[in-house]
Structure formats: C-alpha cells, structure tokens
Amino acid sequence: MKKLLLLLLLTAIISIFLSSCKISKKTDNDVSGASSTNMSETVTEESTTLNPQRAQGVANEIEKGRFDNFDKYSDEDKELIKKSVEEDGYTLEYNSDGSATLSNEEGSWFIGTGWAENEYTESMPKPDFGTVTMSAEDEEGGSKFYMFLIRNASAQQAADYVEKLEKSGFSSTEEKIADVDNGIIVFKGKNSTGKIVEIGYSKNGLTIKIFK
C-alpha cells in the first residue's frame, strides 16, 4: 500500500506541474520525454521564418513543456509565437537573457533558462543529461520551492542522479523507488542544512523540486 501511495505521489508531482500549464486543454497522443523533446528540436532546427500555422505548433510545444529555447528564432518569429501563445490564453514575455516567461492566472513558468544557478540549487549536483524545458519558483505550505521539468532523460539517468544526490549529502526521508525497468523513479531527501529535494520520473519526464 505504501508503495502504491508513492507511485500515486509520483504521478501527482508530474501531473501537477504539467496541468498547471493547462496541458489538459490540449489533445494529443502522449509520447515519451525523449520523443517530445526531439519534436521540439525538429521544429526549431527547420525554422527560419515561421508562418502562423507553424508558430502555433511551436506555441503548443511551449505550453506542453516540450520546448527548450528561442535561440534559432528571429524577432519576427518570436512575435508570431507570442501571438499564438496569447491566443491560447497565456501571456508570453521575452526576457533580456533570451529566455521567456509564460504566465496565466495560475502562475508563471520560465522557458529557455536551462538549469538555474541560484540559492535553491547551490551545493546540489547539476544534471548533466536531458533538456530543461520549464522551471518555476512557487510556494507550498508556507515553504518556497524551485522546480525543474527535464525532458529527453532516461530512467537510468534519473536513478543515477538520485545516487549523486545521496553522495552529496541528501538522505532519504521516505521510501525510495528506483524501478528503472518500469521507468519509475521516486526520491525525497534532506541534507544537513535542511534543504529538501523531491525527484519524480515517469514517461512524461523528470521533475526536480527543491525546498530551501
């Protein structure tokens, strides 16, 4: 029963992050994190000048957490993407560092920032795999946290990352699940400074949630 509850927690961790971007309003066939990221990269690599239809495709990738960065898009392309995103009920603001902030009434998410070096990630091992497609800072139960969504990551890579966390001083506070064969990784740990990290991996991707 306890393992079942942890599996449900994993599903909740990922679904909450993705559904907060209103992914449920989109209808498409579910694909793995690796395939999703490749779809995004394909769109990016082929894009020099977008038409409205292709801009909508990029907007969909952004809203579903499958988009990595805006590096290959012109200012004109980015304005078309922005228009498409805002037609879906979001706001999209481009930042001076080349990233963007996606927002709706439920919150804001950073797109194209990669792994953030900040007070949350200080002293934590940086993932050397996958693609960070979304990150966000929020609060839960009075405690602030920072969350990353990483696509194009395998279950083995997620399990290896948990081992790195343990070696860096994070001790498990709940039952750890490292079922690589079935693609399920769950870990919640705390270090000597009181920092808490929650890891959840499934076919939707890897989430890393850090409480300072």
Image (cartoon, rainbow, N blue to C red):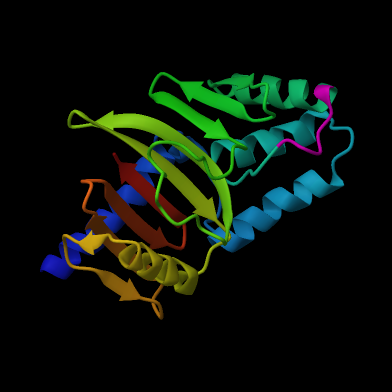
Residue occupying the point 45% across, 45% down: 148
Percent from the top left, x then y, of residue 169? 29, 61
74 in the magenta segment: yes
Residue 166 falls in which quadrant of the image? bottom left
Percent from the top left, x then y, of residue 104? 46, 21
Query: From the image, which quarter does the N terminus lie in?
Result: bottom left
Q: Give the mark count.
A: 0
Q: Please provide the residue range marked out in magenta.
A: 70-75
Up/down of 158 relative to 188, above or below: below
In-front residue for pair 170/160: 170
Percent from the top left, x then y, of residue 163? 36, 70
Query: From the image, which quarter does the C terminus lie in?
Result: top left
Residue occupying the point 85% across, 47% down: 46
15 in the magenta segment: no
Residue 74 falls in which quadrant of the image? top right
Q: Is residue 171 left or right of residue 138?
A: left
Look at the image and tell me whether residue 194 can be seen. Answer: yes
Up/down of 105 relative to 68, above or below: above
Percent from the top left, x then y, of residue 5? 16, 61
Q: Residue furthest left?
A: 1
In-front residue for pair 60/127: 127
Look at the image and tell me whether residue 65 can be seen. Answer: no
Q: Residue furthest right?
A: 48
Q: Is residue 11 left or right of residue 180?
A: left
Up/down of 31 relative to 24, above or below: below
Residue occupying the point 63% across, 43% down: 67
Q: Considering the whole magenta stretch, tell me its main secondary structure.
A: loop
Residue occupying the point 69% across, 48% down: 40
